[in-house]
Amino acid sequence: MPFGVSSAIMNSHIGEIAALGTSVSWTVAALLMEHAVAKVGVMAVNTLKVAFGSAYLAILALLLTGHPFPVGLSASAWLFLGASGLIGFVIGDYFLLHAYVLVGSAMAMLLMSISVPLTAVAAFFVFGERLGNWALAGMALCVTGVSVTIASGNKTRRARADAAPGAAGNGAGTVTVSAGRGPGSYAKGVAYGILSAVTMAAATLCTKAGAVGVDSVWATQIRIGSALFGFIAFALATGKLREVGVALRDRRALPVIALGGVFGPFVGVGLLLFAIQHAEAGVVSTLSSLSPVFLLPPTALLLKRRVTLAETGGAILAMVGLALIFR
């Protein structure tokens, strides 16, 4: 492809490319954070990753604007972006992590993918965004591909758990439901998963409303700063601030969290803010949700996990959808 043509395509799809970069960045962050969470816990990792991200952003803002923190922004920008950080990172993570416990991470991620059509529909009514037929078809394929990938991974993990030594059974070939995973807990977990999707869509819309005319670095700072405030307040209210202190003294986990802070709240969220400013909210929501598909190659190559045919098919569907969005 001639350079001029490829350059024109990049310029016309700069928002979509940034959203795709968000998924790539969050994929790297997920691989790093999985190790850290196993060592020091979710609360410590969430709090420290946004703390590191805030520090990185302050340095970048100082270099680019001469100010380490946002200045001269309207009250509405602070309000919407701050709300976006609290809703997306703090409240959204609360629902999502509880859904992990009650219905499993795969089902929780599947439920959270509902945020894509929710965002697209809400953006139509709030911002008047209209997506073309190809973009809508591409979004549908991406969501289907991610859903198939997650559902297949969930089925594979359950099969391995059933076959593992010591797996609990009821004598009829089924696994006994563990504590906290009964019918009532499952319904509650599904509700939490749906609420995580609603909060994700709400956070995207708040970001879209607050980021108009705001430098993407400053917009990211406000989102991450409000998330840091929220995590610290939550840790104080629940008595879990000590976990953060323990993590700060862990010489193995801390460097991993610091590096994860680069790819998660620094690069990933920064690219997401830029994408929201330059592309339709529904498309951005779709392209930034491809991490479960992008995680397949590294988990197969690095973690030696077998990738099933259904997972591969889901990845192909997502890639076809991706091509349609960029058509």
Image: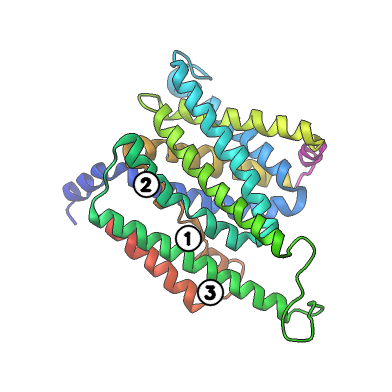
Rendering coords of residue 196 (x, y %): 57, 47
Residue 89 appears in the rendering: yes
Camera-nearest residue between 250 and 108: 108
Cβ–Cβ under 8 Å for marks 2 and 3: no
Q: Is residue 82 left or right of residue 12?
A: right
Which residue matches tag 3?
Answer: 307
* C-beta proximity under 8 Å, tags 2 and 1: no
Residue sitting at the far bottom: 172
Q: How many marks?
A: 3
Secondary structure mainly formed by the magenta segment: helix
| Residue 314, quarter of picture | bottom left
Which of the two labelled residues, at mark 2 and mark 1, occupies the earlier sequence position? Answer: 2
Residue 305 appearing in the image: no
Q: Secondary structure at mark 3?
A: loop
**Neighbours of disc 1 within 10 Å: few (<14), some (14-19), many (20+):** some
Out of 165 and 300, give the one closest to the viewer: 165
Query: Which percent across, then down, holds residue 165?
Result: 79, 80
Which residue is labeled 2 in the image?
A: 120
Q: How much space separates mark 2 and mark 3, taking CA atoms?
A: 31 Å
Q: Give the image location of residue 257, x and y in percent.
A: 66, 44
Residue type of the residue flagged with mark 1? Phe
Up the image or down, 220 lies above or below 1; here it is: above
Point out the frontmost of discs 2 and 3: 2
Q: Which residue is mark 1?
A: 294
Three-letter amino acid code of the residue under disc 2: Ala
Q: Is residue 243 left or right of residue 52?
A: right
Magenta stretch, residue numbers: 242-252
How far is mark 2 from mark 1, CA to CA?
22 Å
User: Looking at the image, is 110 positioned above or below residue 267?
Assistant: below
Specify few, some or many for label 3: CA neighbours under 10 Å numbering under 14, 14-19, or 20 or more: some
Q: Amino acid at mark 3?
A: Val
- Judge the density around disc 2: few (<14), some (14-19), many (≥20) Cα neighbours within 10 Å: many
